[in-house]
Image: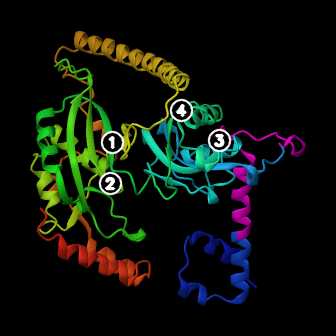
Amino acid sequence: MTTNKELCVNKRNKLLSKEELEGMSKEELIDKVIQLQAHNLQLKNIIQKRDPDGKISEESPSKKKRKFDFSKAYKRHILLKFLYLGWDYQGYASQEDSVSTIEYHLFRALEKTCLIEKRENANYHRCGRTDKGVSAFSQTISIDVRSKFPPEDQMLPESLENELNYCVMLNQSLPDDIRCISWHPLEDDTFSARFNCQERSYRYFFPRGKLSIPAMREGCVHLQGSHDFRNLCKMDVANGVVSFTRTIESAVIKEIAQDGSDDPHSMMFLEIKSNAFLWHQIRCIMSVLLLIGLEKEKPEVILELLNVQKNPRKPQYSLASDVPLNLYETSFEDKDSWVLNQQTLERVIRDLETQWMFSSIKTTMMLEMAKDLKRMLLEKFPEASEVGCSGEELIQGAKMKNYKRLMERSKGESLEDRIEHYVKKRRLNVNQQCSYWTTVSSTTNLS
């Protein structure tokens, strides 16, 4: 008989290995299964009972709408482009224990408007998977949705003009900070937003502060081209990612106002373009660029980090904040066939401008208060040094009292060590391991 104490110990084990499970008695396994079933039921009840605002749903079974008969409906394959402000969400991808994801709200709206029956048979692919706090102006998905027209007529101009207004329908069911912009008809139902995307562009917004923008721009030059970015990303070996070579088409820092102002409060952004990115790659890159801008590192440190033969292990450093990052553009082969609606665009612009207005009022209020406090400080204490944002605040984690150069810091595990670790845990198979060594032999000349 398993005691309560033993059950508590088992609860703390998040993952049990095959060997540990084989060593458990029949009674222990039964208790473990019962415990997991109860936990899963609890999570399902939490998700089902709560709406997006976290309130208990009061809809009674008698008020349920009559089920839509999808067997009598036509379908078409489309690209759907939408934007979202991701600051208050737990990321793009659905999570079992949270309704605070972009994907949850998107599929909730798709099902509520009867554009799809369920996700599993919707032929769905997403272009990018943004992390917690990250926003998007041009997130794109490919999906099968309900259509007014049979397949043979769907590409006719009059069908495109009179098709269901997908953006209006979805925007009526989506939160204010998620908005559909346009859709694109597709003839090939195997077309994938993920695999057929030709280029992805991200922007990372930041204030000029006390940063040396010329030094940061010099660092950006070293990023361009094909490199092994294992020291400028989070290595996702556990999920089978063993190749970290990516090609950066461009990396530039631009001013928003473009008036040549040196005002520390003027806004800038890093624009970086590639066909594909690695996990946390841009936030790692931006963290190092901020250190360069603060003149704590030389621009050449980028070259050191990209030289994985000389530096096979990543030095320990913190990520840049997630809030300023935005998946800004996703490019596909046919750029001119997006279906746009004037009323939809006008409404989305009004929604964004309204949110901007209130956010701008808040930031202006805070800035004026800070300026007046600075005047008070200097009037009372003339010897006081200038206080304000330097840009370092965007780097997460505790700040070092005595700064240590990146290449002098302690290092993490090498990629080879991680691969060996997960092979031993049977999380990687022989084919993935072979894939790594094939990649190594074909990229030994990359800087």
- Which kind of residue does numbered mark 4 sit on? Asp
* Disc 2: which residue: 277
Residue at horizontal 45 percent and vertical 16 percent from the top? 361
Q: Which numbered dot is residue 48? A: none
The residue wearing badge 3 is 109
**Figure quadrant of residue 108:** top right
Q: Which residue is mark 1?
A: 202
Crowdedness of circle 2 by 10 Å Cα count: few (<14), some, many (20+)? many
Question: Which residue is at the front of the view, 242 or 89?
Answer: 242
Which is nearer the N-term, disc 4 or disc 3?
Answer: 3
Residue 224 visible (yes or no): yes
Q: Secondary structure at mark 4?
A: loop
Asked if residue 371 lies in the magenta stretch, the reply is no
Q: Earlier in the sequence, mark 2 or mark 1?
A: 1
Toward the top, the furthest residue is 379
Task: Give the amino acid type for the residue marked by disc 1 in the picture.
Answer: Tyr
Q: Are marks 2 and 4 in contact (CB under 8 Å)?
A: no
Q: Who comes first in sequence, dot 3 or dot 1? A: 3
Residue of label 4: 177
Horizontal and vertical percent position of residue 333:
36, 47
**Comes first in the chain, label 2 or label 4:** 4
Q: How many marks?
A: 4
Task: Name the image quarter holding residue 195.
Answer: bottom left
Q: Which stretch appears magenta? A: 37-65
Amino acid found under the numbered disc labelled 2: Phe
The type of colouring in the image is: rainbow
Q: Nearer the viewer, residue 343 or 382?
A: 343
Quadrant location, the N terminus: bottom right
Closer to us: mark 4 or mark 3?
Answer: 3
